[in-house]
Amino acid sequence: MRLVSRRAVLTRRFNSAVRLGVVLTIACAPSNDKADGSSAGREASRTRVDLTGAGATFPYPLYSRWFNDYAQRTDVRINYQSIGSGGGIRQMIEGTVDFGATDVPMTDAELAQAGTPIVHVPTVLGAVAVTYNLPELKRPLRLSGDLLGLMFLGQLTKWNDPRLRDLNPDQPLPATDILVVHRADGSGTSYIFSDYLASASAAWAAGPGRGKDVLWPAGIGGKGNEGVAGQVKQMVGSVGYVEVVYARQNFLPVAHIRNSAGRFISPMPYEIGNAAASTFTGVVASRDLRASLVNAPGDQSYPIASFTWMLLAPERIGRAKADQLYQFIRWALADGASTASALGYVALPTVTATRVLALIDTLAAAPRTKP
Amino acid sequence: MAAVSRWSRQQVGDRVYDFVTSACAAVVPFLLVLLVIVIARAAWPALSLHAADLLTGTTWDVSRGRFGAIPAIVGTILSSLLALCIATPLAVGAAIFVSELAPRHLRGPLSFLIDLLAAIPSVVYGLWGLFVLVPFLRVHVMPPLMTLFGMLPLFRGPAYGPSLLAAALLLAIMILPYITSVSREVLVAVPRSQREAALALGATRWEMIRDAVLPYGRSGLIGAVMLGLGRALGETMAVTMVIGNRHAVPHSLLDPAYTMAAVLANEFAEASDDAHLSALMAVAGLLLVITLLVNVVARWLVWRVRQSHRPLASSIV
């Protein structure tokens, strides 16, 4: 608690230092219109806006590109610290940033703690890939949620188990131990994966459950995506999970996972996007977009997908800043989508983006408590 | 007059010198006190709410608010003690060779190489452990261990590679230079008269080392070993890369385990709820207490050995 509030104080100091810097820049800038000082000041503050945000590391490469591109188009500069989803939520509750970002939706208790309405705005899709090290296999491994659950519980221990052979007929599954690798550090990737296991495997739901750090009953822990991937690459007979962008960039073997329609799906952009599209057709129009995408309906949906969110507290940051953020989100979802795809992320499918933009419009039109 | 002013100027200089040095000396205890206060305050919620669970629980389940630190405590102590058992004979043997037996032209380069081993950053050891030691253990050491001694619970698989054994071996390599270096200094400091007296009594070279040199340096050797233990307890990066990071008390040398320092390194950055942060701070406090205890025990051992050793030394001389 103490630590965090110290962090908050530091952030506040940092922010005020940044603001001071901005004021000084404005003050020192040569002004042609010296007679009308007040209007010059207003002019300057309109041309240069600074926003600060903090949170998830997963979307950080994309966000920094977006913020950079956006700053070149407009005079809005967004400073983002990738301190992790937990840190982003924390700073939103403390009110030390203009916006937060997270891969793990805030709980109702956390929302209540913030003391001001916080809106979850999906920006892009993430997914978790199951990677493995079985050199004998010619085709991708096929897995189902309940078998994955048993593997990570340590209750399914041999690769040549009949249940695995049923899913992978005529694949040469070896008679060796299944070596499980999980994340040792708390992470949004672990949250998505355990959220999926909890929804697909009754045994997992009754056991470890979902969370950024759960009690992994079996296997070894690696730090970060690179830690897990490194262990899996080294150990023949191992299985682990990593963020899908990381898996694709490093050409890791990726398992096909059985979705709720009974089909085996690989984590490709269309299949991940489909998880979002099929989930949102069913959701009632509300301001709460914290929907979980795991085990989404639809023939073509990849079952271990998730949103990553920006967190906004419109009433706290005031109209001007909120409007700037709304503008940015509109730009990011429309013009920024191609950047997202180029960087390996999965942009929101049209139906979902429309839904998010409708939310932004409602927020922008809402009467303000603060001017 | 001139003498008096000169004297007072000297006194002023003395006072300034006094003040500066005592301020320097005060910084160290001040930092320690500050450290303890900060950790204690941050750990207080966890200690006041679930101290019993923390000190006796074996379940570390963040999502359910269970923080039992026993697996990490056991892992820390086991990996360090195992490392010590492996490193001490090697280190003392190396020190004896360098100080007593090595030809003169070999001593310099050997000491230099041993000291160089201490200068390698721990993350480099960790990477070496991850990419060389662990695969080697998994392929060439663990399978034969499992087939030969598999009936003993101590050598049951599965052979992940990252394990208590890997961590202990890596730690042993890492603390080897510290123990060797200090032991060598201790042995070199043994007076010539001790050796000459032993030789004069007709001792062989080995008897001279065993009966005159080693007992004389015993307190220093214990100090060297305890220094190594202190380093092993606090080592973080290298251990977390090879120990497997599992919150469970290991039952076999091949089981993955966890250490307190590794828990802190892995979980602190993403710890978001108060209970988790506080439990981690409590673990940090426990680690501090364990390290302090090791130091106290080391002091006590050195003191006791000195007490019992003094009459013996005087009787030989």
Image (cartoon, coloured by chain):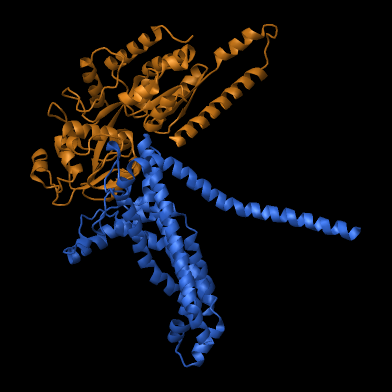
Q: Could you tell me which quadrant the N terminus of chain B lies in?
A: bottom right
**Which chain does orange denote in the image?**
A
Q: Quadrant of residue A155?
A: top left
**Which chain does blue denote in the image?**
B
Name the side, left or right, on which A316 lies relative to A154. right
Q: Residue at x 90, y 58 (%)?
A: B2
In this view, the residue in front, A348 or B146, is B146
In this view, the residue in front, A226 or B232, is B232
Q: Residue furthest front?
A: B48
Q: Residue furthest right?
A: B1
Q: Residue at x 52, y 74 (%)?
A: B107
Residue A302 pos. (x, y %): 21, 28
In this view, the residue in front, B161 or B223, is B223
Q: Quadrant of residue A26?
A: top right
Does residue A243 appear in this view? Answer: no
Q: Quadrant of residue A203?
A: top left
Name the side, left or right, on which A155 lies relative to B229. left
Q: Residue at x 46, y 36 (%)?
A: A3
Residue B275 pos. (x, y %): 35, 37
A122 vs B51: above or below: above
Residue A364 pos. (x, y %): 40, 9
Q: Residue at x 39, y 14 (%)?
A: A330
Residue A254 pos. (x, y %): 23, 38
Q: How many marks?
A: 0
Name the side, left or right, on which A303 lies relative to A224. left
Does residue B118 appear in this view? Answer: yes
